[in-house]
Image: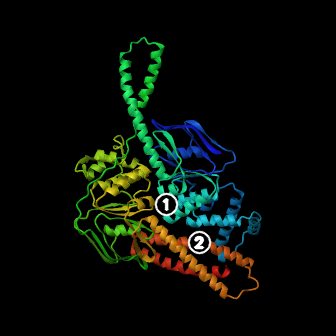
Amino acid sequence: MNILLAEKLSKTYGEKTLFSDLTFGIEKGQKIALIARNGTGKTTLLNIISGIESADEGQIVLRNDVRLAYLPQDPEFDPEANVIDLIFNSENETIKLIKEYESCLLSIQKSENHSFIPENYEAVLRQMDTLDAWNYENHIKQILGKFQITDFEQKAKELSGGQKKKIALASALINQADLLILDEPTNHLDLDMIEWLEEYLNKQNLSLLMVTHDRSFLNNVCDEILEIDNQQIYRYKGRYEYFLEKKEERILNEKAETERAQSVYKKELDWMRRTPQARTTKSKARIDNFYEIEDKASKTKQQEMKSFGVTSERIGNKILEINNLHFSFDDRKIIDDFTYTFKRGERIGIVGANGCGKSTLLKILIGKYKPNAGKISIGSTVKFGYYSQEGLNIDSSKRLIDILKEHTEYIRLKNGKEISASIFLNLFGFAHTTQWNYYENLSGGEKRRFHLLLVLSQNPNFLLLDEPTNDFDIETMNTLEEFLLDFEGCALIVSHDRFLLDKITDHIFVFEENGVIKDYYSNYSEYRKQKRKEESQIRKQSQLETQKEIEKTPKKETAKKRTYKEEQEYQKLEVEIAELEIEIEKILNLMNMGETDNEMLTNWSNDYQNKNESLDEKMMRWMELD
């Protein structure tokens, strides 16, 4: 049963046609991924479906009873709006009631000693009971907790891009829509959040249409793929590997058809030139057929990004040795006694929670940060190529071709040949017509792609890559992976892209608690499988121990219920504990940045200690009330 039908959609910007005559439907329960190159209209299509933009031609037909929720790629909010208004932005009566309940809790929290009780508080509590909204409220708190959203009073203008994306995603999930449309939902999420979102979407009985560059996420959530290519849409009923196989078949068939048309076209063109002006009805039909053949023969496939290998500088026997490395901010350990000797050709992934110190390790290796203790010994032949999340610090008023030529005029390939800067730009998807664009006019994804291009153009033999696939389309990521598989030097890669980690890395460094870095000789998927097994065993052991304690404890005739005031205190403590946990996490992230003076670090460290003590006290009281 179709809940949405897109009929003959076309969209053009200026002289560029994004897509033409697109027709497709979405049925109840289908989970579909939309794939295309950057700049070919994925986000525009989602905006048209959601009613934000209009198509030049065609229409969207949505069933009247279908509730739709949309997560844009870059959410835009009223700068003065509070987080609570952004999250609970819905006409759903239960959600509106929960918003009123949370507003009451905020009023209580802001009052002196939490003594103020809003007039409507008791009425709201009764209404929550009447509508049985407590389970829904717990469901919402679970979502907000996963995305670390607790400060409901914060204004939109104070939020980072990542915070805005998490709030918009939480709001879309809370609305419990029939059709959920998501544009790059995994941006700004760490691996734990992404895996939780996968599990959540798989459990929900909803229809889904999403754009994502995360191929593991796509594979684990969607079982159907729509691809926009050459302004047309193609449908594949299967997961990502099936899509790759069938797309290759389609391209080969189209190529063969074009070659056949070109062969026939040559013969028909000769006939057209020899045929006199006065033509019969029979020749008129042949003439019409000629123009159809001409159209097929003139079709050319958009140039694919070719697989290529850039030569790297010769690397000696001694590469990089890390001995007993220590790095910390005051009392917080970022890296604790880490030792490793790199071997020729190794490709190692780095994973861990946001803010744990992954990027810090790379900055220590290039000399941007100095370790507290330990020794780093770099071989004399090592030439680093460092790709950072911060991007490039260059004159944005310069043209792309001029910026690259300032670094190098020619790039040496593995086959011994040299290619010009212009051809190298073309290999990375910057066509000759766009190479004269100014850097400041590039999109975020294009700037990151250009940054990577500059790093590789220097012929490094040791790559340090910090989240290299963010904002890349899938085709660009496939090309990067092929390059890394063919790269003869060493590579150390920080990434949330599980597909990339599984495909190219030999093993992974995992940042654990208290600065411990463990080396797992497996790919990421095998590591996560082992960790889940260990976590399951720990939970089972904990449950057994808890059960034994319960059996030892004498049973009471009746359980003591919380008084009205205790219930109020219990609810407030839940909010305060969650807020403290987020504040502590923020302080840790600030401390982990490392780009400040010692006085500021000391202040953060003291604040970190005080908030931890407050958290312990509140947790003890919460446990008593619980």
Can you give x and y, in whole percent of width and height, for residue 134 in the image?
70, 67
Q: Which secondary structure, mark 2?
A: helix
Residue 251 located left or right of residue 53: left
Give the label on residue 578, or none. 2
Can you give x and y, in whole percent of width and height, for residue 466 in the image?
39, 62
The C terminus sits in image quarter: bottom right
Q: Residues within 10 Å of mark 2 (few under 14, many from 20)?
A: some
Q: Which residue is mark 1?
A: 188
Q: Which secondary structure, mark 1?
A: loop
| Mark sitting earlier along the chain (2/1) | 1
Give the label on residue 124, or none. none
* Snapshot quadrant of residue 366: bottom left
Q: In percent of the image, x 38 and y 67: which residue is there? A: 507
Q: Is residue 447 visible?
A: no
* Callout 2 touching callout 1 (CB < 8 Å): no
Can you give x and y, in whole percent of width and height, for residue 268 in the image?
39, 22
Can you give x and y, in whole percent of width and height, for residue 2 in the image?
64, 44
* Snapshot quadrant of residue 1: top right
* Snapshot quadrant of residue 262: top left
Q: Residues within 10 Å of mark 1 (few under 14, many from 20)?
A: some
The residue under label 2 is which amino acid type? Ala
Q: Is residue 94 visible?
A: yes
Q: In percent of the image, x 45 and y 61: which residue is there? A: 498
The residue under label 1 is which amino acid type? His
Q: In percent of the image, x 40 and y 48: which residue is there? A: 442
Observer-nearest of 501 and 78 = 501
- Single out the mark in the foreground, 2 or 1: 1
